[in-house]
Amino acid sequence: MIDATTVVDALAVALLAAALASVAMRGLVAGVWLLVVQSTLLALVAATIAVASGVGHMWAAAGLTLAVRAIAVPAVLFLVLGRVALRREMRPILTTRVALLAGVGLTLVAFSAAGRLELSAAYPAPRALPVSLSLTFIGVLLMATRRKAISQLIGLITVENGIFLSGLIATLGLPLFVEIGIFFDLLVAVGVTAVLTMRINEHFDTVNTDALRRLRG
Amino acid sequence: MSLSPLVLAMPVAAAALCAVAGRRAALVSVVASLVTSALTLAVAFDSFVGPPRRALGGLVYVDALSGLVLMLVGLVSAMAALYSFPYMRNAVASGEIAERELPSFHVWLQLSIGAMLAVPLMNNLGLMWVAIETTTLFTVLLVAFVRRGHALEAAWKYFMLGAVGLGFALFGLLLTYYAASHGLVDAAGALDWDELRAHAASLDPDLMRVSFVLILIGFGTKAGLAPMHTWLPDAHGQAPTPVSVLLSGALLNCALYGILRFHLLAAGSVGSAFSSDLLVWFGTLSIVVAVPFVLVQHDLKRLLAYSSVEHMGIVALAVGIGGPLALFAAAFHMFNHAIAKTTLFVAAGAIGQRYGTQRLAHLRGAFELAPLPALGLVLGTLAITGVPPFAPFTSEFGVARAGFAGRPAALAGAIVLVAGTALIFGGMLFHVLNVAFRPAPRHSHQAPFRFASVFLGAPLATLLVMGIWLPPLLREGFAAAASVLGVAP
């Protein structure tokens, strides 16, 4: 009999691997697929906690995660990718190797920082909290070092996933209606990005956010 | 019966109507905004004189602080909707915007207004976060409404910085929830303001410290506090001017409101010194950062945007200084800034459309070409830079006086405030007088602006009267908001 804590820990480590993989990969389609993997793992974490804790609204959280983060959001992103005919992250600010090193470094920082926090989590899974912090850091790294609007959005969603995971672990999520509100916002946010990306593409004939560096002072 | 549910419903209904109203969308939008504005005034005045009210089964909580912000959003959004009428007509005439896009502008405008009105009404701090995030999403679309490269750049920067900031704030919210749900409050109500406020003293101080820092960084990004303000001049400068009015006068106050609620919780848990000092430092830094950018500015709307950074800093500083005098001044100054900035942006928008540019170097002789907007710009500048007898002088003087009598940090803040406002007075007036009185260029655009005297005169008259005589109802309102903000030392 494997206990639920072990399962959550294992899922968390897999999440970390998926996030690091998105640092290593430059293909945008692969990036969105890795997002699907991340979100599915996140839904599984919620479901596992739902089984183990018997808290009913965790099932709702798991279902919403699957529907919104793993299906709806990637679907919109694929749609945008199809429209703008774009496949790879060209000339990222850091080379893949340096970025991966930075990602691993941030993960180590996250693990040592989380070790110092003495939180008595509602759901004690010792790996999950440091992983959630790592996801947040890695997401910021992606946002800061990628040039394509879509890659930056993938970074942003990775940040959100990290926060969501720590919420699951620390407090069994937020109250359900707040959670629903957050999911609603995430959906609208992705819709807004889709609109903006297409307009940037239409206007500059590129989705490089490099073109967006002229406002100063 | 409370009117607050109607306040929430009106903009949503208006947005739906605008979507189907076709050419009449602008009219629907204006009428709806006026009704919404009247409703917010009724709710706000009620909150100024009475006890806090609840509605919709505890979903809505309105005290005088909510009332103050609600009133500001109501007034400013009505002005923004009204001004969008002539502004958009000129924009269509100049080919900047296609006429068939107008209804969608009003849909986004109404939805933005609805989200902003929800911020001060939500009892649950989680839903307040959701409302603030929603304001970003809809206003981003408004900023990017004109499909110029610069506008898209500004919108993207605003979106990304806003989203990261709100991520920080979400982490802070989570920590507060964690602190509250551990045995203190029933988990379902653990984010409700009234519950949290009642139990603030027993929240874990270490957690609340971290939580407040995250909230201050997160919501501070949206409130335009330095050093997280970098999106603000871009977004305010590039947005269609009615949207600049809305961002500067309404949105910034909503974000600041979020910080203030958590400041009260942190002060209750940790003691007031921690969060108050942070507010003093961030407020002071915002004033300092605004000075050089005002002095060497090249764009009229960016000039006004940096002035917003300064004034958000002044309000944060005032709340950080604390005590009845400074808190009253903070509430009063939130009002003054919202009204004055509305006038200034309307004047700047009218002048900008006349010249077809916002670049200060090209705006000359406005007094000849657009006399009323030029006069509004000069008088509005005098008002916002703290020249008596306009009301901002009274509120800024109150902040400075409280600061000089306060602890060392407050004293430092007050010294920076006096020096900073003096420099900004010189800088803004220099730019604005150049715009108004230097010889006019030969070419200009036709940009008719009817009722300019009402658009510009009404808010300026309000500031003038309130600098001399404060109506009792508003005095009570500011005092009541100040007493909500009061924390035990």
Image (tube, rainbow, N blue to C red):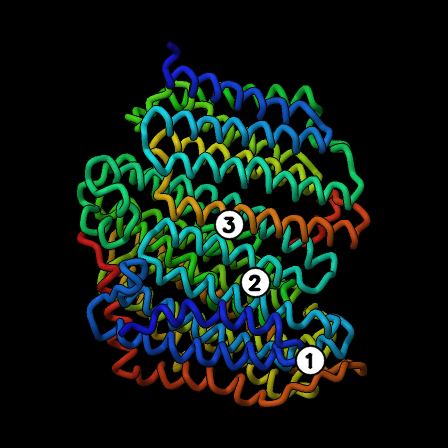
> Pointer 1: what residue?
B89
Q: Secondary structure at mark 3?
A: helix
Disc 2: host chain? B
Amino acid at pointer 2: Val
Q: CA distance from mark 3 to mark 2?
A: 35 Å
Question: Residue B31, image x and y in percent?
Answer: 51, 82
Question: Residue A42, image x and y in percent?
Answer: 49, 29
For discs 1 and 2, the disc positioned in front in the rendered view: 1
Question: Residue A57, image x and y in percent?
Answer: 36, 38
Amino acid at pointer 1: Arg
> Pointer 2: what residue?
B294
Question: Residue B41, image x and y in percent?
Answer: 36, 77
**Residue A185, labelled with which disc?**
3
Disc 1: host chain? B
- Seen in the picture, residue B141 relative to A165 is either above or below; the reply is below
Q: Secondary structure at mark 1?
A: helix
- Seen in the picture, residue B228 relative to B405 is either above or below; the reply is above
Disc 3: host chain? A
Q: CA distance from mark 1 to mark 2?
A: 31 Å
Q: Is residue B101 left or right of residue B321?
A: right
Q: Is residue A90 left or right of residue A168?
A: right
- Seen in the picture, residue A181 relative to B460 is either above or below; the reply is above
Residue at screen point 60% across, 87% down: B372
Amino acid at pointer 3: Asp
Residue at screen point 18% across, 44% down: B201
Is there one chain holding both mark 1 and mark 2?
Answer: yes
Residue at screen point 82% across, 49% down: A205
**Is the N terminus of chain B in the top left, top right, bottom left or bottom right quadrant?**
bottom left
